[in-house]
């Protein structure tokens, strides 16, 4: 079964390897795409708001963004995987 972390790693250029390299990549990605926070959870939220999502629970924001804005279908995890396989292009 494909892994979302593999898709994220492929979509986001490498950063200095650390114990939390995937989180470092995601934080930098969110900051590059509208977030200002240095905390991963807050940055994810800010990324979605910057994409035009109405503030709500993060999973609800992802659901709307991926299904309505980006046109993905399926379960949330499947849509997130497809988003990252597609390069994570906001």
Image (cartoon, grey):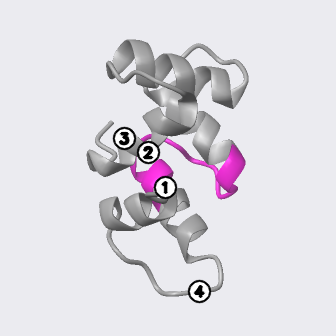
Which residue matches tag 4?
18
Q: Residue at x 42, y 59 (%)?
A: 8
Q: Are marks 2 and 3 in contact (CB under 8 Å)?
A: yes
Label 3 – label 1 distance at C-alpha? 9 Å
Q: Earlier in the sequence, mark 4 or mark 2?
A: 4
Which residue matches tag 2?
81
Q: Are marks 4 and 1 in contact (CB under 8 Å)?
A: no
Q: What's the mark number on residue 4?
A: 1
Q: Which residues are drawn in magenta?
A: 28-41
Label 4 – label 1 distance at C-alpha? 19 Å
Task: Find numbered disc 2 in the image and state the secondary structure of the residue it sits on.
Answer: helix
Q: Earlier in the sequence, mark 1 or mark 2?
A: 1
Q: Residue at x 43, y 66 (%)?
A: 6
Q: Earlier in the sequence, mark 4 or mark 3?
A: 4
The correct choice, above or below, for 82 with respect to 22 in the image is above
Task: Find numbered disc 1 in the image and state the secondary structure of the residue it sits on.
Answer: helix
Left or right of residue 11, residue 50 in this image? right
């Amino acid at each position: 079964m494909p892994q979302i972390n593999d898709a994220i790693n492929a979509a986001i250029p490498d950063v200095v390897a650390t114990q939390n390299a995937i989180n470092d990549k995601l934080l930098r990605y969110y900051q590059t795409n509208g977030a200002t926070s240095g905390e991963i959870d807050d940055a994810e939220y800010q990324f979605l708001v910057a994409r035009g999502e109405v503030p709500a629970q993060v999973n609800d924001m992802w659901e709307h963004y991926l299904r309505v804005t980006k046109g993905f279908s399926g379960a949330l995890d499947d849509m997130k995987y497809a988003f990252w396989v597609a390069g994570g292009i906001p």
